[in-house]
Every structure is written in C-alpha cells, then in structure tokens.
Amino acid sequence: MVGKAEPVNGSVKSGSNQSIPATMQSPLKKSDLIPNLSLKTLKLKTKQQELLIRVSILCLVYVLAFITRLFSVLRYESMIHEFDPYFNYRTTLFLTEKGFYEFWNWFDSESWYPLGRIIGGTLYPGLMVTAAIIYWLLRFLRFAIHIREVCVLTAPFFASNTTLVAYFFGKEVWDSGAGLVAAALIAICPGYISRSVAGSYDNEGVAIFALLLTFYLFVKAVNTGSLAWALASAFAYFYMVSAWGGYVFIINLIPLYVLVLLITGRYSMRLYVAYNSMYVLGMLLAMQIRFVGFQHVQSGEHMAAMGVFFLLQVFFFLDWVKHLLSDTKLFQAFLRITVTTAIGVGAIALGVGMASGYISPWTGRFYSLLDPTYAKDHIPIIASVSEHQPTAWSSFMFDFHILLFLFPAGLYFCFKRLSDATIFIVMYGLTSMYFAGVMVRLILVATPAVCLISAIAVSATIKNLTLVARAKSKVTQTGSVRGSSSSKGSSKPFQRNGAIALLLGAFYLLSKYATHCTWVTSEAYSSPSIVLAARGAHGNRVIFDDYREAYFWLRKNTPPDAKVMSWWDYGYQITAMGNRTVIVDNNTWNNTHIATVGRAMSSYEDEAYEIMRSLDVDYVLVVFGGVTGYSSDDINKFLWMVRIGGGVFPVIKEPDYLVNGEYRVDKGAAPKMLNCLMYKLSYYRFGELTTEYGKPPGYDRARGVEIGNKDIKLEYLEEAFTTSNWIVRIYKVKPPNNRW
Amino acid sequence: MRSASEHDKVEGFPVHFALNLVLVSSESRSKVLLAMARSTSKDAQALLHSFRSAYAATPTNLKIIDLYVGFAVFTALIQIAYIAIVGSFPFNAFLSGLLSCIGTAVLAVCLRIQVNRENKEFKDLPPERAFADFVLCNLVLHLVIMNFLG
C-alpha cells in the first residue's frame, strides 16, 4: 500500500483525477485479491486511497477532539464546573422536567429576591435545547442516562463537530489538505479547549460550532450563489443567535465583508443572492428569540447589516439600469441623481433614528470592545470580571503556541491567492485578533480563524516542500513534467536535502505543538473550580470539596424558604446545588441590587443588619481562603464590592478601606476595614487557629500576614456552619430582639 | 448644446456642482440653478425614454417576476402608510407584515437573477432548481412570519 500510495501523498490536489502511469501500478483485477487482506493487497485506485486516508484522518481527529477534553472527568468526577454552567444545568433540568412551554414562559422567584427574574425571556436557549434534544434522543433509544451526563459531555461532542466544520471550511477556502490540517489544529488548540472542556457546560461550547458553521455556509453561498446554501446559513445564524450573545460579531463581520468586496470591485450576483437572503431570513429567524427581540431593527449594533442591505439594493439597481441603458452619458446622469439621493436619505434616516433615541447606541458590553477604557470608568461590574481584562502576550502564546507565527505566514498565502473566500478568512482573522487583544475571553472567537489561516500556511508549505523533495524520483522514472520540479530535481540535490530537512523541522514543530496543547489542557484548563486540589506534605493529592459540602448543608439544614445573601459569584451555584433563594447571582442584570449587597458587606455590622432585615436575609455565605491559601476568596474580591457599592451609594468610599492606597488586613489596616461585616465574617474565630507551623495563630495564608483584629464579636449574626477547610462559612441572621 | 458641455466637464461628480453653487454670486447662482433644472429634466426625459425601450426587450418570464416584485413593494408601502397613520403597535405584527413583503420581493429578485439567461455566472443552474429554491425559501419565510405574527 505504501509503495503504491507514494505518488498520491502530498502532490495530489483534492478531486483531481491523477492517472498513475501504467508502469507504476499493477493492473487491477478482482481475482488478484489474496484472502489475507493486508493493506498492500487492497489495490485501490488513487482516488479511493486518498478518500480512505482522508476519512480515517477525520475520524481520528474527531475522536481526538473528544478525548482530549476528558481530563477532569477522569481525575475528579463527571460534574459541572465553574459558576455559569450551574445556571445552564438548572435550566436544562427544568426544561427536561417541565417541558418547553413551561421553560419558555418561566418566571423564577428563587433568585434576585425580592425581584425575581424572567428566565424565559432573558436567556439564550440554544444550549439548553440542544442538550435536551440529545437527552430525549438517547432516552428514545432507551439509553437511561442522567441529564447531568449529557450536559457534561455536550461541549466535547460539539468540539468534535467543530473539527468537521473546520475541515469543510478549509476545503472551501483553500483545498482539502488545508482542511485536514485545520481540523487537526482546532481539535487540540488550547484557546478553544479552555471553554469547551468536559463539564464546562457553557454557551461558548455550542456557539463556536454555530459560528464556524454560519461562516462556512455563508462563504459557500457566496461561492456558489445558491439560495439553498444561503437558507442553510440563515438557519445556522439562527442557531448561533439562540446560543450566544456573541452573534453580534457575525452580524457585523458579514456586512463588513460585503463592504470590502464592494470596495475591491468584487461585486457579483452571487454576493447579492447570498447576502440578501441570508440577511432577511436570518433576521426574521433571530427575532424569534425573546431575549434578542427587536434588536435587529432597533439597536445600533445591528445597523451596519441594515445599511449594507440597502447599499446592496442600490448597487444592484444601478447595475441593472446600467445594463439596460446603452447610453453611458445618460447613465452617469442617473447615477449622480441616485447616489446623492440614496446617501442623503440614508444619512437623514440614521441621524433621525439616533437623535430621537429610537436606534439605541452601542451597549456598554460591546462599546467597551471599541473603547477599552470605557468600562473601567463607567461600568465597574463589567470591568471587574476577570475574563474581560486585556490580553497579555503570554496568554496568546499559552493559547496558540506555534499558531501565533503561522498566522502571519498564512495571511501571506491568502493574499497571494485572493478570492472571495480567502478575503473572508483574512477579515475574520484580523478582526477577531483585534478583539482577542482587547478581552481575554475573546481569544475563543479568534481560535477558529487562527487555526484555519495557520492550516493554510502549514498545508501550502508542506505541499511545496514535498514537491521539491519528490522531484528527483519523478524525473528518473517517467520523465513527466510537473511544473518546475523536473528541471530542479536532476541538477540540484542540495534543494532536495534542504526540503527534507525543512520538512523534518516542520513535523518537529507540529509535534511540539501537540505536546504543548496536551500539557496546557491537562494542567491549566481541566480544573472544575468547584473542587480544589493540592499536594499534601508527602506528595499525596488533597481534595478540597468545601463548596459542595456547604451547599449540601444549606440544602439539608435550612428551611426551604430561606434566603441566602452572598456575593454574586456564587448565586448560580447556591440555587442549583443548595436549592435556596438568593439575593443576587451571576446574571448581574440589576446593578443597584448588587450594590446593595456590596454596601451591606462593606458596612459596620449594625448598618449591615438594617440592610439584611430589609431584604429578608436569613443566611449569609462568605468564601474564605485564609486556612488553605485559596486566593479567590471574598477578602480578595472585597475591593470590587466596595467599588460597586460605592458606585451607587456614595456613603461607601474606597479610600476608607485603604491605608496609603494599600489594601491591608493586618494590624496596620484601616479601622473601617477591620470592623466591616466582610472582615468579621471571614475572620470570626480565626484568631484562635494556627494555620502554619512556626507562624502565630491568626496567620492568613492567602494574604501572607497575621490578621489585625483577632477578637471578633458578632452581635446580629451567629455562625451556622464552617466547612472542614474553612473555605465556605455560613452565618445565620438573628431575628430582632423581643421588646421588653 | 449647453447641457452636453456640462456633462463633458463634470462626469458625474456632484462635488463640482456644489462648488459651483458656493463660489458664484447669488444672481448667477439662480441662473446656474435654472440651467441645472432644465438640463436635469431633459436628462430625465431622455432617460425614461431609453429605459422604456430597453425594458420592452426583456423576456416575458422576467417581466412577470418584476411585476411580482413591484406588487410586493407596493404592499409594503401600503403598510408603511398605515402605520404612519395608526401607529406601530403591536410591533411584532408590523415587522412580520413588512418583512414578509420585503422578504418575498428580495427572494423574487434573487430568482430573477438566477433565471435570467444573460447572467453568465448562473449558466449551469437549471431554472427548475432556481424555482424550487425560491419556493423553499418562501415557505420558510412565511412559516417564520406566521410564528412571529403573534
């Protein structure tokens, strides 16, 4: 098989009918097949060999993409990670238990007490509906599987599907070799793995699949000009809108792409057909999602698409008139009139819309992408999320490795062979890299573009190198001319050796990439965040399962209508696992409510008690890392509570908690800091505890200092539960004293 | 003729006209405007005439599609006039009505492009396939409209 396959590998373009000269291939006879079917005797034609290789590579990549995401399932257990996925899990559970109608019209009174939350109208249902459909399908096939297993494994399943879409996309943009490389690269790329590991049941796991599918189908529609492909891309866009708020990227990139094509003179009928049908059908389908609503006609973020829609109509109309009129002078007069009126009308409409407020300006979440300093000054909640910080170079290197320098190489190849499809991939790559630089979380959106463009570089380079490496063998055997290889092969053996050396170097780099990706996945992106692990003194693994311990305690030891106050990070987990009503949660839709909680945490105990009584709070939950050295606890997040609370209630001033601009918890800390509710609840009874050998009692291992106020007395709260490693502490709010 | 010379000078850039208007004094400005209006009306008449004669040459099936597009746009205009008088509540009903007209007009234009034998890009596309795509897309469009009507 290998001997016969040699002319096939690396030098055959997809679908090309290479006929191997008769001298190199023994005649195909069915009777020649020997009963012991080794591969040598399969005697397939070249096209079939190539198809076999391609299909087997794709199958291996599909399986690889799935299994590389299973580290945390193997190390811990099959559970949901982090914070947001718990909300998605809870809603999926609700969907499978109560049905779609109840889910679509769900008003939840267990969060944001006393306001409640219209869940049916404020979530993106794509992920939940997808998991529910998979669950119902498996149930129909009589696999009695729990919905949690389906939720945990949804993201890896869709990551495998993404590799398939990447293959087809690469095939569309360049050729099938590039498609295969793209599929292999995206299967293990850490930028994508970070949000699609098993257990990370979040919108992005499904959304990246939908994003790539929409782009692929749209490029296919532009290339073929077929209404059917445009309809398919409209459906893919609908799936994307139902899955993630990042669909705004699609609805802005595609009009930008159409504009670039118009400017570079590549206007064609295919483009008209593809964009118009996709826009109208996609917009209508997208408006069926309640959360999106009428934004496609009212929000400033979607106006680019509408503007390009009208521009295309103008272009088409002018093109048609030009075609009809044979007189160029008349046409130019017509052109003058039309263009001025069109621009005038468009500008007036846009101006009136924005001035009257009908077209809303860009919302803070997306505006902070264009102006990165906006959020820090105006919206502290957006600025406080760690995923929204600008990206450092080390993050890029960590998430992309060699793709980072293959990306410019791929751009070079794309510019060498410009077509509608390569222009699209270049634009996607450049815009997504800009946004990835602004916000760490958006490295995820850039990953498919980077993988595709790098795949083009890898595929084109390796193809050229193998052509040069094979040149000599070609000349001696058949004398057939294959471009420049025949002349080169016989006269310059140095070139052939150089090509082989470069090939080996390329394979070495790719293997280093695979090693790096697996190491990153294993070390950095496979932790469940809800279960912490550390190495004990003897090297044994110590597991801290405090979070789940605390939520289970809440579930079993508190009255069912108890209300729990905590910082908004833990809201989703408390409702999902503890099954209790919370005051604020991760949805962060009401800034004033969060600021009220922040104010309560930063006030003295008596003021906080007033606020807690007004909110009917029964229990307070804080996270404390002083005993274990866990650094993501509430004391480290405390300054954000102060800032957010102070943003709404000016009585909370950040400088009150700092000493010379420094944030301290030891003896030299500010007096307001030493007596605020958060400090008291975190360090209650901590002054008696010795945490580390050789250090005084009350030594905080997360901050590395001995705490300032060790003798804490609580007047309005009492300690209800502290977990075994002191990570989660729950306090009960005492009812008011009886009157005399 | 004066209009011809103005055409030759300007070549379709409206900027020159604007500059003209700004720089000259008010009397000559009114003279220039009058001349412009006369030339524009002459242009418009010539334009319409040649347009009509060229359009008569298009095949009948394309003219039928154009009639359908015109009807759809006319219906959309009626709806816009309606909401200008009565108001746009409920908004989803208005949007679904308007978008169904615009959507089917756009799809018909796409069909026209694909069926038109003069378009070299769509030479290999059989008109039956184009029509089938058109029907499918319209089906999807109207199903979504019916869901959106509320």
Image (tube, rainbow, N blue to C red):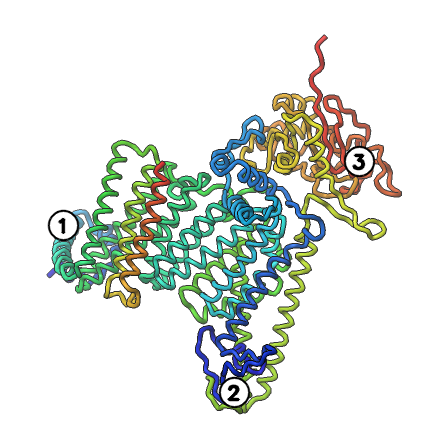
> Label 2 lies in what chain?
A
Q: Residue at x 88, y 43 (%)?
A: A693
Chain letter, disc 1 residue: B
What x and y, as percent, mark residue A268? 32, 62
Q: Three-letter amino acid code at disc 2?
A: Met
Q: Which residue is mark 3?
A: A707
Q: Residues within 10 Å of mark 2 (few under 14, many from 20)?
A: few
Question: Do the residues marked 2 and 1 share a common chain?
Answer: no
Residue bearing mark 1: B34
Which residue is situated farthest in the top direction here?
A740
Residue at screen point 52% across, 63% down: A452
From this view, report whether residue A685 is shown above or below residue A472.
above
Say the numbered circle drawn on residue A24.
2
Say if mark 2 contacts mark 3, CB within 8 Å: no
Q: Amino acid at mark 1?
A: Leu
| Quadrant including the C terminus of chain A | top right
Left or right of residue A712: residue B140 = left
The three-letter code of the residue at mark 3 reads: Ile
Specify the quadrant of the image occupied by residue A613. Answer: top right
Q: Disc 3 is attached to a residue of which chain?
A: A
Alpha-carbon distance for marks 2 and 1?
83 Å
Q: Alpha carbon of mark 1 to alpha carbon of mark 3: how far?
A: 88 Å
Q: Is residue A227 left or right of residue B8?
A: right
